[in-house]
Amino acid sequence: MLEKNFTVMLLLAAGLFFFGPRTAVLASSDAPLPLTAIQGTTAGEGANFLPGDVTYLQKLADGGNVQAQYHLGVLYLKGQEIEKNVFEAISWLRRAAEQGHRDAQYRLGLLYIHGNSAADARYWIEEAARHGHRTAQAELGRMNAEGNGREPDYVEAYKWWLIAAQQGDRKADRKRERLETIMTEDQIREAVSLAVTFKPSKPEVQ
């Protein structure tokens, strides 16, 4: 185990150039956000809207505003300021996800997990993970470790947990350490190499 840990430390040290500093965590905020903040393209992902804004939000979403589409999907999902409707939630989240909104991609993936649609779930979780969504990266690690209808892929699981850990996910790091006990040194070396050369795709929506 000491030899494995030493190997990981060396490979990570060599790969710091690729990782750079830990990126900010993408998490949903509960702080209300005035609707005017999303009329452009720089509104933060995950914020909610003030009561009474839903009608205008719907207009923006209908007009193709990706932030509005995402937030409208969340409102339908939670039943906030609008009657809960999972089908509408999926529809709006999918529109946002297809435009590259990584929070929408992650939420959509989770909905498909709960809906027992493994292929769709994996696709959208992978998209969010590739775009740098830390929680999606950790979830993708779990999917690969458990298989989810496929053969477990410990190298991929280790890779994604390590990438999430480099963004500050301690749970992912603990899972990576436990997985390490059943992997060969060659597998670990391969996984670390894949992780340190990973560069997230720039999301179409910041």
Image (cartoon, grey):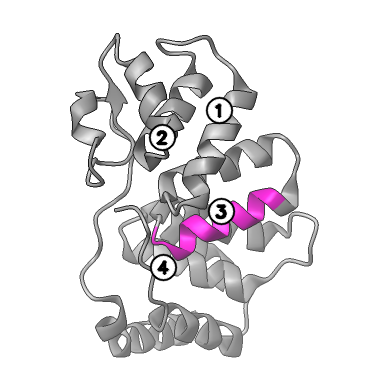
In the rendered image, which quarter is residue 190 located in?
A: bottom right
Residue 134 position within the rendered picture, expressed as x and y whole percent measured from the top left? 40, 55
Q: Which mark, residue 125?
A: 3
Q: CA distance from mark 3 to mark 2?
A: 26 Å
Residue tagged by mark 1? 89
Q: Which mark, residue 163?
A: 4
Q: CA distance from mark 2 to mark 1?
A: 17 Å
Q: CA distance from mark 1 to mark 3?
A: 17 Å
Give the left or right position of residue 116, taking residue 90 as reference.
right
Name the element at disc 1. helix
Q: How many marks?
A: 4
- Local packing at callout 2 (Cα closer than 10 Å; few below 14, some 14-19, many 20+) is few
Give the left or right position of residue 120, taking residue 82 as reference.
right
Q: Amino acid at mark 3?
A: Ile
Q: Amino acid at mark 4?
A: Ile
Helix, strand or loop for the magenta stretch, by majority: helix
Which mark is nearer the camera, 4 or 2? 2
Q: Nearer the viewer, residue 125 or 81?
A: 81
Q: Are marks 3 and 2 in contact (CB under 8 Å)?
A: no
Q: Are marks 2 and 1 in contact (CB under 8 Å)?
A: no
